[in-house]
Image: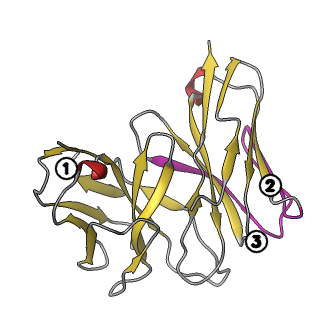
Amino acid sequence: SQQGEEDPQALSIQEGENATMNCSYKTSINNLQWYRQNSGRGLVHLILIRSNEREKHSGRLRVTLDTSKKSSSLLITASRAADTASYFCATDSGGSNYKLTFGKGTLLTVNP
Amino acid sequence: NAGVTQTPKFQVLKTGQSMTLQCAQDMNHNSMYWYRQDPGMGLRLIYYSASEGTTDKGEVPNGYNVSRLNKREFSLRLESAAPSQTSVYFCASSFPHGLAGGSYEQYFGPGTRLTVT
């Protein structure tokens, strides 16, 4: 069953604008990860935030985690056409098997 | 360093035929995974192998079998393909167990597009 649910399902913005995607999950987690998938390609890891962290940055990416609300957000600043892709959150709910549960994704379109 | 490779890239099967999807990684990762991706469904875990010599069912294992041939290779077999198995299949691998615990990032292959008619 799906653990993470991204919101919105689709987002269309202009180049230079910021894009914010949200992820909600149901059970407690060890960490939460964000991945990007360009059309027809495999997923690429973007950033991992652990359950004891509240915010993390990587280049133009900013991820927040609120474990009390069981939610996370991914902010892409100054978006570019090359950021057009689907973005997925994935949660690790613990155990020794290192399984991730992926959400259904947000399709981001950045218009030039 | 090729990362995670998958073969074939595309495959068309008739109902009832069998096939094996191959996956290999050259990053010395312990854990390997098979997912399927269907429109609007995200990725769903079929089987995984936490370490060489072990395999376990994921969320949607019915109709599939796996073999962890060695540390590098993890294959997925469809014994009798059905139209419901039409999907894009991704293999992934992740770092070995570390002191910090928890999952590490997963590295994905390019996928296999399978159509069952």
Disc 2, SS: strand
Residue A7 x, y percent position in the rendering: 71, 40
Image point (65%, 57%), residue name: A33
Q: Given the image, what chain letter belongs to the residue carrying mark 1?
A: B
Disc 3, SS: loop
Name the residue that disc number 3 marks.
A28
Instruction: Please name the amino acid that badge 2 sits on.
Output: Ser
Q: Given the image, what chain letter belongs to the residue carrying mark 2?
A: A
Crowd class of label 1 (few under 14; some 14 to 19; many from 20; radius 10 Å): some
**Relative to B58, is A3 above or below?**
above
Label 2 or label 3, whichever comes before in sequence order: 3
Name the residue that disc number 2 marks.
A71
Please report the bounds of the magenta region as a residue range: A43-68
Name the residue that disc number 1 marks.
B8
Instruction: Identify the disc placed on residue A49.
Output: none
- Most distant residue in the right direction: A68
**Relative to A71, is A36 above or below?**
above
Mark 2 vs mark 1, foreground winner is: 2
